Amino acid sequence: MREGQLRNSVLAAAMLAATAALVLPSPAVAQKVELIPALGFYLPVGGWTEVEDGGTGLPLRRQLSALVFSARFSFPLAKKLDLQANLAVTPSQVAQSTNTGTTDLDGGVYLADVRAAYRLVTFKDGPTYDQAHWDLITSAGFGVVHRGGRAWENMSGVTRPVVLFASELGVGLFRLTAEDFISWGQYNAGRPNATRPRVHHDFIFSLGISLKVGGR
């Protein structure tokens, strides 16, 4: 990833984190600030083809599945509502296919977002002195996706806004999460090798652990 692209990605993530900090609840409410690191599986859906055929059979670019690491801060706003700031990174390569074959190029995907998480229902199991809680949580928010690495060198439009929808099951300290980052993009717009504009889904399925980092 070029230095300028990395700088833009970091700045975008910092802006999102700053936005979250501005709307944090008062100390009386923020009693259980959590850090949720997670490891998971990144699953992109779809690909991009060029608008014009440059003699190579309309090259197809597809982001490839890979492991993903994420970290999420969760700030309580109300009894069932949290504000969360999230950052996810994956070394996903890009498969570039033409009529002469397919080449895997080094790449990476960086996702940052701010989301509202609402606890839909809580199931309790076991005696009161050793009770397990099963929380079903739904989330929605906004953020950015940045595609970097050699696969995206000298291409424009690699940083795009995203809309996020997520579902999460919390059992004790563990968090099992499914996320869908939805973006719309066209790369190299206005150039002969511009890709067709399209909606793209970046799915993440992860298992994390909740660590208390603030409050009582």
Image (spheres, rainbow, N blue to C red):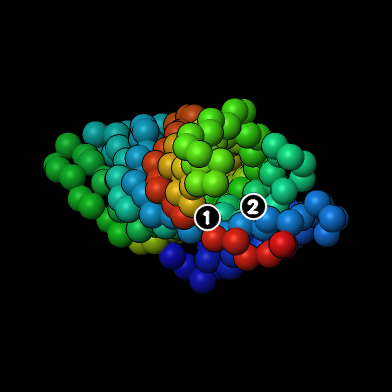
Can see residue 16?
A: no
Q: The N terminus lies in which quarter of the figure?
A: bottom left
Identified at 47% across, 37% down, the residue is 126
Name the amino acid type tagged 1.
Ser
Mark 2 and mark 1 in contact? Answer it, CB < 8 Å: yes
Q: Reading the chain from its start, which is encountered first: label 2 or label 1?
A: 2
**Residue 202 screen position, x and y as percent:** 44, 39
Is 54 situated above or below 120?
Answer: below
Is 212 situated above or below 140?
Answer: below
**Residue 145 screen position, x and y as percent:** 53, 48
Q: Which residue extends farthest bottom?
A: 3
How many marks can you see? Answer: 2
Identified at 70% across, 37% down, the residue is 80
Is 111 situated above or below 194?
Answer: below
**Residue 75 screen position, x and y as percent:** 70, 52
Can see residue 171?
A: yes
Identified at 63% across, 34% down, the residue is 119
Q: Image quarter for residue 30?
A: bottom right
**Residue 2 screen position, x and y as percent:** 47, 67
Q: Nearer the viewer, mark 2 or mark 1?
A: 1
Which numbered disc covers residue 74? 2
How far apart marks 2 and 1 lie (CA) works out to: 9 Å
How many other residues sit within 10 Å of disc 2, few (<14), some (14-19) or many (≥20)?
Answer: many
Q: Which residue extends farthest left?
A: 100
Say which element carries label 2. strand
Name the amino acid type tagged 2.
Ser
Q: Nearer the viewer, residue 149 or 162?
A: 162
Which numbered disc covers residue 210? 1
Q: The C terminus lies in which quarter of the figure?
A: bottom right
